[in-house]
Amino acid sequence: MKMYHSLLATALSTALALPALAAPHPLKSVGVAVNDLTNPFFVAMGKGAAQAARQLGGPGVKVTTVSSNYDLLTQVGQIENLIANKTDLILINAADPTGIAPVLKKARAAGIAVVAVDVGAEGADATVMSDNSMAGKEACRYIVKKLGGKGNVVIVNGPPVTATFARVAGCKAELGLAPGIRVLSENQNGRGNRDGGMAVMANLLTAHRKIDAVFAINDPTAIGAELAIRQAHRRDIKMIVSVDGAPDGEAALKRKNGLFAATAAQDPYLIAQKAVQLGYDILNGKRPAQPVVLIPTPLVTADNVERHTGWAKR
């Protein structure tokens, strides 16, 4: 009996000594810092983040979405404001993956979880992005197949961020497997938008008399490139392929006699939703087993576009 009481006392004292389970860190505010809110990709990302944040924190969660127009100083100021407002979680689409590091370090020191989205960012806790290498490979494999392994290709490049680098590298790797493919240009920056794509493509049309196919780093760039081709009345170009799976890209794929042939589809909703969940876990002490999460980018063509669950269908 004495032994029983002794064991019971020991168990009670041990239980009393154990710390109480910590209450989960509430999610009250989320900042979403992107580069271009004229691009539907980032609009969709903001909506996906807001939906996920309210599922985790309730309808009262404050979600602030800001755009830097790819300007580092503007983005640093926006992050400073989010820090000052004691934001719980920041999703960062970095204008400069390295230059943004000091202010992200400051945010983390303030107890804010930081998750990079779409492109990498030095100093973030984790990253969620499309598998951009896969996107470039899928798109340019389609070009090689449709050209029968022979032809002249131009790459309309984009902003100097990790997503762009990976897409172009993936594309070039696939094109390099076909000895009959010649890459005429790969370093012209279309700035990731329609006007930039149109301007770069106009220059490329002047510089090169024979182009068979175009790879553009995203759908807005591709649509701008197609406009330039049509204005120049060029008949040599057989196709344009890109990355996004955006609503405008879907519409372009459905047009009869269009040059827009395929797009490797991203899922901005899913990227943002996973980033918010990851950030919430980090706030509550659960570090990710894998700090970089890659989202697959299946190819969408005129043949399967009707079955594609696009951004506008969310």
Image: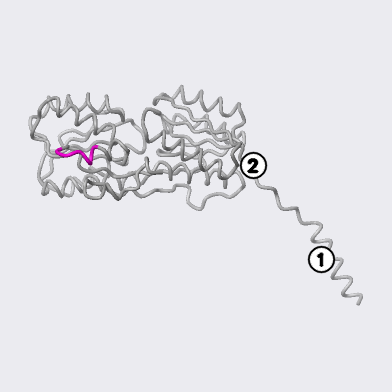
Quadrant of residue 5 within the rendered picture: bottom right
x 59%, y 33%: residue: 87
Above-or-below relation of 112 to 179: above
Residue at 43% from the left image edge and 34% from the top image edge: 93
Horizontal and vertical percent position of residue 50: 51, 38
**Which residue is under mark 2?**
26
Quarter of the picture containing the C terminus is top left
Please tell me how crowded label 2 is: few (under 14), some (14-19), or many (20+) other residues with Cα within 10 Å.
some
Extreme residue toward the bottom, this view: 1
**In the image: residue 22, left or right of residue 9:** left
Image coordinates of residue 255 in percent, x first then y, are 20, 38
How does the figure colour the protein chain or chains? Answer: one colour
Q: Quadrant of residue 39?
A: top left
Q: In this rendering, is residue 61 above or below 138?
A: above
Magenta part of the chain: 252-257
Tell us which disc is closer to us: 2 or 1. Answer: 2
Relative horizontal placement of residue 18, taking residue 285 as reference (left or right): right
* Residue 76 point in image, percent of width and height: 49, 25
Between the C-alphas of marks 2 and 1, the distance is: 33 Å
Give whichever of 307, 194 is nearer the camera: 307
- Sort mark 1 into few (<14), some (14-19) or many (20+) by Cα contacts within 10 Å: few
Nearer-the-camera pick, 126 or 196: 196
In magenta segment, residue 163: no
Please tell me which residue is depicted at 76% across the width and 56% down the height of the picture.
Answer: 18
What residue does disc 1 label?
A: 11
